[in-house]
Image (cartoon, rainbow, N blue to C red):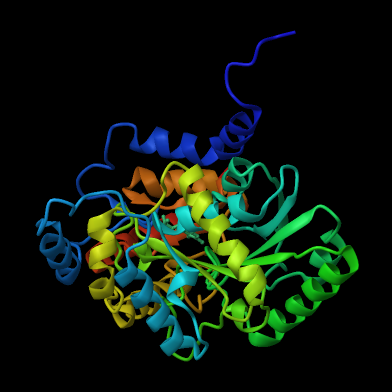
Amino acid sequence: MPIATVSSRMTASIEEMRAVSGFARRILGGGSLGPGACDFLFGNPQEMPLRGFVEALIRHAEPRDPQWFGYQRNEPGAREAVARALRQARGRPYEAQDIAITAGGFGAIATAMLAVLEPGEEVLYPRPGWFFYGALVRGAGGVPVPMDLAPDTFDLDLAAIKAALGPRTRIVVVNTPHNPTGRIYPRAQLDALAELLTEASERLGKIIYLLADEPYARIVFAGQDHISPAESYPYTLIAYSYGKTLLAPGERLGWLALSPDMPERDRALLREAVDMAQVSHGWAFAGRTLQRALPELEPLCIDVAALQRRRDRMVSALRDAGYEVPVPEGTFYLIPRSPVPDDMAFAERLAADGVWVLPGSITEMPGRLRISLTASDEMVERSLPIFARTIGRNDWV
Ligand SMILES: Cc1ncc(COP(=O)(O)O)c(C=O)c1O
């Protein structure tokens, strides 16, 4: 019998990620895309960071006592700032003790999963969707169950979710606003999902949790409202990241919140489990400087109106050029249909002219392209003639 060198869980996640990581390595192997590239790839910042963010970090990096950088789990000030912001935004009595300050949204999701999953339990999550759910589920010993969204509308497929709920189900992930489609789920859909989860929890004699992954909660465009699934279902854990609102994803700051509508008895158990999950994940609390800065960072946000202007400029120019592109309700992404069936070939043609987009076939969205609007306006303007020229080519085989 062969002796395994690494864990089968990591091997499975490496295999699942191979298409994305291989693509990233192939194009970024040299370190950068090179001068003049228009980078629509991974949602990385292309402009200087928010000054308020930098100043808050500098202020709190200066030690004021010998214990300044000593061990600390959650800073009380950070927890209270998050709970206050949630109370104001959502009108529910969120409590500081129910907030865990995490290493970004990744940390919040990983912590939630480790806190409630038994080995072998299933986690349902959206497809297409964020690349890393499967890896985080496996990391917590769970079994990933991707659930296709409805074609074209990208709504939750409630009938499919209902059919998938069974004795092994423990968590259903809802990502709203949704990466990459920009869909914001309406209350009626979240209420209907809540009904399914309540019914299944009772029938199966166990709590099925809803994990609301909401890093784009504030990246919503005019006329839209983010509605948290926590408003529909009490057994909701909310994961958040400041990586999007501050557009500084390399500084790891986020939180996990327990819904105040969960019964106190269960919340008390969860508080302890969440804390131990943070420890078990390798002390996955956010660093102290970020935690101390959090109350000042909480109200900061990138210019969403400017992002919306960029969205509108690109959608209309791409449509004029002949692309079919839906208008996202939130998030950073546009997902035009690839003008030719081979989205990889199309993305490579664009890349040859310095315009870098993600081909949908590596992101479970075959036949589409993903454009990240974190590119600068200047990149957008430079890219548009290239998008127009590439769709106009007649030498596709
Ligand atoms: C849907 C979704 N969830 C979670 C995350 C993780 O956020 P962070 O990298 O800030 O931890 C991302 C980042 O792209 C995301 O798009």
Location of residue 385 (image quadrant): bottom left
Asked if residue 120 is positioned above or below residue 122 in the image, the reply reads: above
Image quadrant where one finds the C terminus: top right
Asked if residue 126 is positioned above or below residue 76 in the image, the reply reads: above
Residue displayed at 63% across by 42% down: 138
Location of residue 80 (image quadrant): bottom left
Does residue 135 appear in this view? Answer: yes
Name the foreground residue: 231 vs 148. 231
Name the foreground residue: 371 vs 64. 64
Residue displayed at 49% across by 81% down: 94
Location of residue 312 (image quadrant): bottom left
Image quadrant where one finds the N terminus: top right
Residue 356 x, y percent position in the rendering: 38, 50
Residue 277 x, y percent position in the rendering: 53, 50
The mark tally for this picture is: 0
Residue displayed at 59% across by 67% down: 268
Left or right of 199, for residue 285: left
Name the foreground residue: 118 vs 222. 118
Residue 61 x, y percent position in the rendering: 14, 57
Residue 31 x, y percent position in the rendering: 27, 36
